[in-house]
Amino acid sequence: MQIVNDFYTRWFKDQEMASSFLARCYEDHNDNYIPRRLANQLARVINFSDFCMDNKSGNRSVQIFFWMSLIESIEYIYFPDKDSEKVDKLGVILNFFRNYVLENDNPYYLRI
C-alpha cells in the first residue's frame, strides 16, 4: 500500500488529496472492488512503464498506450455515472494532462 500511496502523492497537489482519492477507491463499494483494483493497477503499470523506459527495455508507444488506458480508468472512478459510450475520450486525456501533470513534465501545447 505504501508504494501506491507514494505513487499518487507524486500526481496530486498534496498528500491529503492523494489520500482522499485512495480512500474513495478503497472504501467498501458493496463488493465492487473495481476502483481499488484500478488504483493499484494504475500505480503498477505507470511504475513498470517508467522502469522500462529508464532501462531501455521499452518504447514510448507502449508507455503511451498504458497511460491512455489508465487515464480513462481514473475518469470512470471520479465520475462513475458517466456513460462510457458518450465520453469524449480525447477530452478526458487532454484534461488529465492539463490539470494533473506538473508543468515541467507537460508538453507546451497541452498547457494552453
Image: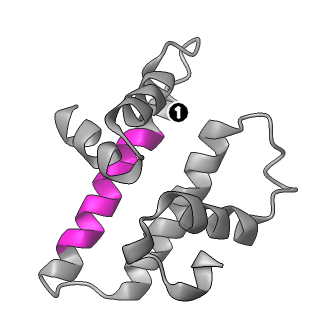
The answer to which of 105 and 56 lies nearer the viewer is: 105
Vertical comparison of 16 with 76: above or below = above
Left or right of residue 30: residue 57: left
Report the magenta stretch's main SS. Answer: helix
Residue 12 colored in magenta in the image:
no
Q: Does residue 3 appear left or right of residue 15 in this picture?
A: left
Q: Residue at x 48, y 16 (%)?
A: 27
Q: Residue at x 57, y 50 (%)?
A: 73
Where residue 23 sits: x, y (%)? 43, 22
Identify the residue at image location x=66%, y=79%: 112
In front here: 15 or 34? 15
Residue 15 percent location from the top left of the image = 32, 35
Residue 42 in the magenta stretch? The answer is yes
Find disc 1 in the rendering and name its residue.
Answer: 34
Image height of 58 relative to 19, above or below: below
- Say which amino acid is labelled 1: Ile
Residue placed furthest toward the left: 55
State which quadrant residue 111 falls in.
Answer: bottom right
Query: In the image as oriented, which residue stretches furthest toward the right?
Result: 86
Q: Position of residue 10 (x, y in %)?
A: 31, 52
Label 1: how many residues lie within 10 Å, few (<14), some (14-19) or many (20+)? some
Residue at image coords 84%, 55%: 85
x then y, percent, for residue 43: 33, 50
The magenta stretch is: 38-51
**Quarter assignment of residue 37:** top left
